[in-house]
Amino acid sequence: MAEADKILLDRRIGSTLERLVERFSADAYRGAQIDLWVFDGLERRSRATNLLAGRGVAARIRSAYKPLVHAFLEEIDLDGVSGIVLRYPVIAGVAENRFLLEAYPLTDLVGARPVTFEQAAPGALDGPPLYCVELARNDGRVERILVAAPNRFHMDPLKEMVLSSTGWLRIRAAENPDLDCDQRIETDQEAAFQAVMSVLEERQWPDAGACFERLTLRVEAPFYDCRLGAEAGGFFSTAEAMHEDLYFSALEFFKAKRGLAAGDRTFQPGRIVPQIVTRQGPVRVRITLGAEPPARLMNDGANILPPDDLATAGHWLQPEAIKRHLDGLGGDAYQAVSRRGRPVWGTHIPGPGPQMVISAGQHANETSGPIGALRAAQRLKRQGAIGFAVSALENPDGFALFREFCAVHPEHMHHAARYTAGGGDLEYVARGFENEIRHLARAKTGADVHLNLHGYPAHEWTRPFTGYVPRGFETWTIPKGFFLILRTRPGWKALGDAILRAIVDDLADYEPLVALNRAQLSRYLRYVPAPPFEIRKDIPVFASEVDTGLFPVTIITEAPDETIYGPDFIVAHTAQMRAVLAAAAALAAGAS
């Protein structure tokens, strides 16, 4: 910790599981039956179960996070099962598919057995919501299993009522009924989350300007990852879930405190950094205010590739490699400077006909775009059919934080690295610093068309302590393949539609991407049966008309790339490249 850092909180929270094991080891509980839901992994829960069994207590200790999925992974026997009907709870005041989403990716955990989803009758929250699982067995029997999903209604940091995962305890003690209970318990990880938010709410923050340079929210706990395999939705991680919920809850808190609308360009609270550490023993929460580390570039020779090797890059590039590839393009170099003083590079390659601007790395945890942009730029320069400007790493401060996170959790989505060091989204803050690079590009090219290369989570995105489904990002909670967004100003729709058609047609010929999209869309549509987008040739598309924006036509690509490596990463940046090239070809041909 830097000498100037100020500690706002340093607290240890006893392990819920260890505390309850000690409590139930008393002679009074001998012969009791205990059902407990906590946020610990299977290994810790199994150890606790065995300890209690040695004391004469029959305990069933389950996961409070995604309890239905854990039930299929740990308890439900599928031998001899030919089909499954799942009735999921619907709770008044909550989105109808809330518990259907929480069942993801159940259909990929049961082999070829068909799964039918049905809504249970809507009701109020009275005890833990219940999934009803009906297993049709080969001998004609139907086995019915109820799976509890402990949740509670509570006020979140935005003072909105949400339904969130929680701990639960049931005790049945035949010989001592005074011990019986059936109630919600606050677990250690819930307490850690609440401790962070309470400190933020109690502290006096400035009413304007940055609240801090760097706010570090460190939580150490016995988190765990559950790896399901690529064919079953990848994996999920309680450490990642804590990172996501802390980050977005803090961001929402500061925005609400200043009474700002979602797109307010004055919002720059500073850098919010969740440090989520997996360790056994008591949970520890530490909050510090401090300065950002010195701005510097990080070198890793293993990730610096010659320009002709970009097509085989199975890993995101370091900034030096990105700069090297940009320099290799030649052209008219230009540069902006990030809030922390890092260079934001761009280059303009003059050419005939209409011009285009290509950008990547606006959200620094979306890593296939920079390589896709560089590969496309190399091809466009050789073709010489169109002039363009390219900036492949618009948010170098965010990218430095992303690399910091990846040193600990290389496969997580790392949304705290999404925004600039000021804490705002590059596209939605006042002109200056990083987003000056786009204004420079437009001034050099006069381009009306912008290809903005993005990504989104490659596995499920959750916020377990504030409603489970990420607020404002509900469409993005489950991957649905490579996705396209068209934004046009009034009067520019025809050009935008023509370019969009060209991109869709080209991507539909890229077989590895089509296979990926079909698999992910098939899974997505089981849990979101009425998607808010159109599907064209296996490519999800969303088009809208907007009155604002630097460019009259913007095409946004969305690759499920947070955070992937190897062959999947190559498919993602190849699709990014192909999208740019198809757009350029359509523009050069007049986009008729």
Image (tube, helix red, strand yellow):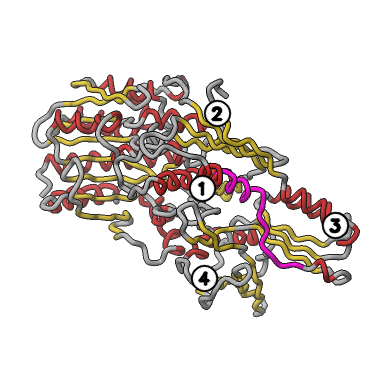
Q: CA distance from mark 1 to mark 3?
A: 35 Å
Q: Is residue 476 above or below residue 527?
A: above
Q: Earlier in the sequence, mark 2 or mark 1?
A: 2
Q: Earlier in the sequence, mark 4 or mark 2?
A: 2
Magenta-colored stretch includes residue 186: yes
Q: CA distance from mark 3 to mark 4?
A: 36 Å
Q: Position of residue 413 (x, y in %)?
A: 47, 42
**Which residue occupies 20% across, 35% down?**
357
Q: Secondary structure at mark 4?
A: loop
Q: Which residue is mark 2?
A: 6
Q: Which residue is mark 1?
A: 245
The N terminus, quarter of image = top right
Provide the residue span drawn in magenta.
181-196
For the residue pair 375 and 103, the one nearer the viewer reads as 103
Q: Secondary structure at mark 1?
A: helix
Of tags 2 and 1, which is closer to the observer?
A: 2
Q: Residues within 10 Å of mark 1 (few under 14, many from 20)?
A: many
Mark carried by residue 53: 3
Q: Earlier in the sequence, mark 2 or mark 3?
A: 2
Q: CA distance from mark 4 to mark 1?
A: 22 Å
